Image (cartoon, helix red, strand yellow):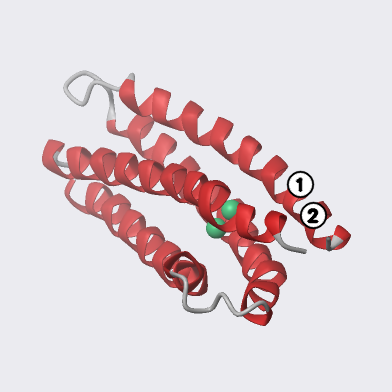
Amino acid sequence: MDVDILKELDELKREHRELLQRLRELDRSLNGLSIASTDAATVVEALQGLCRLLKNEIMVHCAREKESLLPVLLNRGWGHHTVVRELQNEDVLLRREYERLKRALAGVKSTGTRRALETLVSTGERVISMIVEHIHQEEADIFPLLEREG
Ligand SMILES: [Fe+2]
Ligand SMILES: [Fe+2]
């Protein structure tokens, strides 16, 4: 059993718990927003928080995963697994979601319409659920591969 990889997985799981907590908080605040009565600044602020979390923490976390887990997975011959291929691509996917959020934010700033606000909130909610699902999938599919065989 590879001790270093187990240590790394523990650390990544700890980061997952922190990220999930932050994402849940953000999701709760988005759910609590009523587009009809909430001012745009409050909505924009919440979504800017999500953008920062994505860029400063989630992307950093995923880059670390790719760097530390991918070579081990490839080395053990698991490169063909769908989940492993996803790990190779997730930085591209995250960047795409980040750009989407940025565009939705810019849309609110330039038009200020309720429709743009709705798009922003639904984009944010989609990004959050995508990341939550991604984290669960890693813990369900990728981490056990590494824990099982050292
Ligand atoms: Fe990841
Ligand atoms: Fe992760």
Quadrant containing the N terminus in the rendered view: bottom right
Task: Judge left or right: residue 72 versus residue 47.
Answer: right
Q: 50 or 20: nearer the eye?
A: 20
The residue at the point 31 percent across, 50 percent down is: 105
Residue 28 percent location from the top left of the image: 41, 23
Task: Judge left or right: residue 139 versus residue 130.
Answer: right
The quarter holding residue 101 reads bottom left
| SS class, disc 1 | helix
Identify which amino acid the numbered label 1 is placed on. Asp
Task: Judge left or right: residue 75 versus residue 139.
Answer: right
The residue at the point 64 percent across, 57 percent down is: 61
- In the image, farthest residue toward the front: 149
- Residue wearing tag 1: 10
Q: Residue 106 carries which label?
A: none
Task: Judge left or right: residue 63 versus residue 11.
Answer: left
| SS class, disc 2 | helix
Q: 81 or 149: nearer the eye?
A: 149
Mark 1 burial class by Cα count in 10 Å: few <14, some 14-19, many 20+: few
Up/down of 6 relative to 150, above or below: above
Between label 1 and label 2, give the one nearer the viewer: 2
Residue 70 percent location from the top left of the image: 63, 73
The quarter holding residue 69 reads bottom right
Residue 106 percent location from the top left of the image: 29, 55
CA distance for labels 1 and 2 = 6 Å
The residue at the point 34 percent across, 33 percent down is: 43
- Residue wearing tag 2: 6
Asked if ligand 2 lies within 8 A of label 2, the reply is no
Asked whether disc 1 touches disc 2, contact meaning CB atoms under 8 Å apart, the reply is yes
The residue at the point 40 percent across, 30 percent down is: 27
Up/down of 86 relative to 18, above or below: below
Identify which amino acid the numbered label 2 is placed on. Leu
Residue 50 percent location from the top left of the image: 46, 44
